[in-house]
Amino acid sequence: MTSEKNAQIGQAREAFQMMYQISQLLCTGLDTETLTICIRLCELGVDPEVLAHVIKEIRKIGDNATQSRPANLQP
């Protein structure tokens, strides 16, 4: 790889680490893999506000499913 390409990769990693730190400070609950997917979706043109809404709804569904399980099936 060229040094220019290495510099771009380094900058991309640094930018991702900063986004992940912001995510942690905001208590989003997103792990690195999920954050990566969200970033890629935004890069492909998905509206970030719509994406945030979908994530919130998925979490609600997951929370409701967990709460409705019988006690002996709870993790």
Image (cartoon, rainbow, N blue to C red):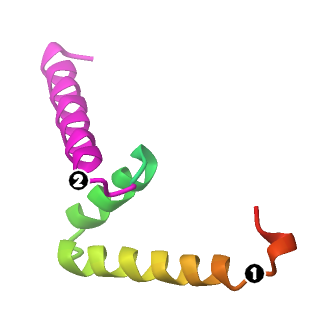
- Residue for point 77% across, 68% down: 74
Circle 1: residue type? Arg
Residue 65: quadrant of the picture? bottom right
Q: Quadrant of the N terminus?
A: top left
Q: In the image, which disc is placed on residue 26?
A: 2
Q: Position of residue 17 (x, y in %)?
A: 25, 34
In front here: 71 or 35?
Answer: 71
Residue pictured at 19% horizontal, 45% vertical: 22
Label 1: few (<14), some (14–19) or many (≥20) C-alpha neighbours in 10 Å: few
The front one of 12 and 21 is: 21
Query: For numbered disc 2, what is the local secondary structure?
Result: loop
Q: Nearer the viewer, residue 51 or 24?
A: 24
Q: State which region is magenta.
A: 1-29
Residue 17 is one of the magenta-drawn residues: yes
Q: Position of residue 45 (x, y in %)?
A: 20, 72
Mark on residue 12? none
| Residue at which label 1 appears | 69
Q: Amino acid at mark 2?
A: Leu
